[in-house]
Amino acid sequence: MRERIEEAAKRAFSEFGYKGTTMDQIARLAGVSKGAIYLHFPSKEALFHHMLRGVIAQVRDAFESAQVEGDDYFRNLERGLRALMKFRADHAMLSKLVQEVRQFGTAEARAGLQQLEAAILDYLARHLQRGMDLGVVRPCRADLVAFVLFRAYTSVLRDFRPEEGELSEGALYELFTGLFVDGLRLRPGEGRASNRTFLEER
């Protein structure tokens, strides 16, 4: 029964957003009584946050699935960023929440998207920290770099509309390399105690 409720909630939030979804709708879609839902979830808000936690886990899976064992750390990082953006754009529930925030400014939907973004940034920061631990990423403020990378990729994939069509994967990687990799990559012989940059911990 719980799986049916979760599937119905996913469909309802994807079609109607947070504001437009009711527990009655979810009950009808799941083919259960509203009381049965309350046995598992005390409120619509609790059910919504449960669904968000599932989405956050799927986002992390999308990043990890894009990793190629043995490939260059930065290629994997860029590939993972692209996978995150694609997942977010293709996920019906997230797309509906973004639309709802733009149209109505629903506080719960906005908070849900902020929770998702915070989880993504935390995950990226930890991935960058792993790069530092491996000796391939220069010492830096992982949280700051994660924020810049995420916002830059979001803007490029969402807002940049070249006349010749969407950017190819190769073009995206060239952009990523030119803007970020040269500043982040720890070069042979440079050592981990290299000159501090504006991205390092203060």
Image (cartoon, rainbow, N blue to C red):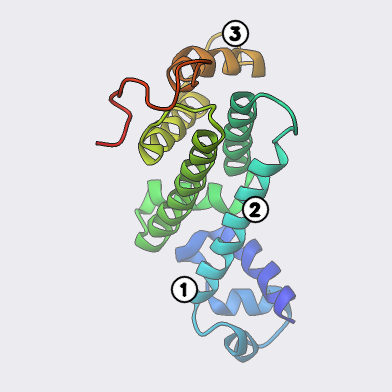
Give the residue number, with chain letter if any, for mark 2.
58
| Residue 176 point in image, percent of width and height | 52, 19
Q: Are marks 1 and 3 in contact (CB under 8 Å)?
A: no
Give the answer, above or below, for where 21 lies relative to 156: below
| Residue 141 point in image, percent of width and height | 36, 36
Rendered-image quadrant of the N terminus:
bottom right
Give the residue number, with chain letter if any, for mark 3.
164
- Residue pictured at 56% horizontal, 70% vertical: 50
- Residue pictured at 65% horizontal, 19% vertical: 169
- Residue pictured at 62% horizontal, 36% vertical: 86
| Residue 163 point in image, percent of width and height | 54, 9
Crowding near pointer 3: few (<14 within 10 Å), some, many (20+)? few
Give the answer, above or below, for where 146 lies relative to 165: below
Q: Which label belongs to residue 53?
A: none
Count of picture labels: 3
Residue 140 picture quarter: top left
Q: Secondary structure at mark 1?
A: helix
In the rendered structure, the answer to whether residue 78 lies left or right of residue 201 reads: right
Residue type at mark 2: give it: Gln
Whole-angstrom CA distance, mark 2 to mark 1, is 20 Å
Q: Secondary structure at mark 2?
A: helix
